[in-house]
Image (cartoon, rainbow, N blue to C red):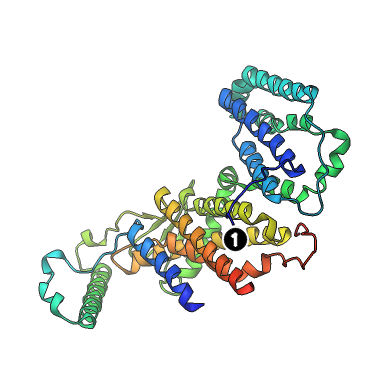
Amino acid sequence: MPIFSVATRTTPSAQVARRIAISVAAMTVQYWIAPVAHSWRPILAFSFLFLLVSRRGDTHPALAPLPPLSTWALTAFIGMHFVLLALALRFGRDLAIAAEGSALAASVLVASKLVVLVPILALFPARRSRSILLPLAPELAAATIALLTFDPDKLFKLIWPVYSPAIAGAMSFLVRPFMSGTHLVPGLDHVLVVGPARDMVLDISCSGLKGLVLFQILFAIILAVEWKDIRKLRSLVIYAAGCLLLLISNVLRLAIVFLTSNLTSDMVNPNWPLFILTLLALTWFTYDWVRAPRPAEGEVPRLAT
Amino acid sequence: MTIRAIPAIAFLVVSQLAFANTPIQVPRPSSQIDTSLLSRSPMANVADMYASAWNMGNLDNANNENRNNPDKPKKEDKKPKPIHGDEMSLGVAILSGACVLSGYFLISRMRKRRRA
């Protein structure tokens, strides 16, 4: 049995997946032509949605078959993309420059980057929106979470003035039993942790963001492979727990770096062992909890929630 | 199950030791490497490593004491440059990700067999 396969027959899931793929292609072209006014995040989120819908299979609640794609629908879809592209080419650069100094222009720019998701509505019949949206609710929720939470670099930069003293405080709390006299000196964009032999600069590169992004990529891969067989709500809990655990393990990593550089002649940065151990421990303890129960003999497989 | 887990653990440890960005440093200057170690028992070599590490620790303590001594010259009081707690490089991130995925699918396979 192949470890990963996408729907190839003309099932309702495959029909929906094909229309999502068309939208991904259009968004990619638009991003390629006018990158200033667009973002790669909607492309990524829709690609993820495509994978999840393709992997969904014929589980219950079933999707109703879609009518063939009409010429009118396709024309409306392409027309909307052309209008958005024209607006992006005309105003995108001005908006990007204005966004540097104006919160209103920045908001308009962010909104314009999400408007690119609208034309896909033309590919689905409006009268059947309920029968499409309800069965696809878990997939749509997962794609929305991916859109909003993947690679939160801007969020980290925004909260860094508050977050950096918090991780520095937690780190100094961990190292204080081993080294007395450790104290913090706040800087403009960093915190200096003063140790007896060596100091440590905590700037944005120590935030734990890289580990978090790597976890998000791995979680998305595993989710796409196992989508049919996992409980959706529980996987959301594990996603949140994984993000939190990685941020905690980052504090532990910083404490080990600080301790080893002060107590020994060599600095040890246990980034990879801590990352691997944290995620494998999470998998080990939650694997059975997140798996859906196997359907009984003759029972229709339901979409696990 | 324990026997099945051994290859996974071995793979994780070996691959990480082979490809990690932090080199393993033996606490001994190269000029002092003694070829007679090769003929000694492994336990004797381990004991020797611990002894040299202990000596380095003592030297560090002595340096710290010197640093705290106000009679010593000011040059020794100067702290080295502050360190950065940077995260993984791209190469290490890719390898760590590969290890986590391998570990995940191994655990998945073990649990599925146990269920069946």
Residue A303 coordinates in the image, percent (x, y): 76, 57
A94 to the left or right of B27: right
* Observer-nearest of A31 and A198: A31
**Secondary structure at numbered mark 1:** helix
Disc 1 chain ID: A
* Observer-nearest of A192 and A19: A19
A94 to the left or right of A254: right
Q: Quadrant of residue A180?
A: bottom left
Residue A126 coordinates in the image, percent (x, y): 85, 34
Name the residue at 47% across, 64% down: A274
In the picture of the structure, the residue carrying the numbered disc 1 is A242
Q: What amino acid type is highlighted by mark number 1?
A: Gly
Q: Is residue A190 visible?
A: yes
Name the residue at 56% across, 44% down: A153
Quarter holding the N terminus of chain A?
A: bottom right
Q: Is residue A170 visible?
A: no
Q: What crowding class fits label 1: few (fewer than 14 Cα within 10 Å), some (14-19), or many (20 or more)? A: many
Name the residue at 44% across, 52% down: B93
- Vertical order, B57 against A22 (above or below): below
Quarter holding the C terminus of chain A?
A: bottom right
Residue B38 coordinates in the image, percent (x, y): 15, 75
* Observer-nearest of B110 and A188: B110
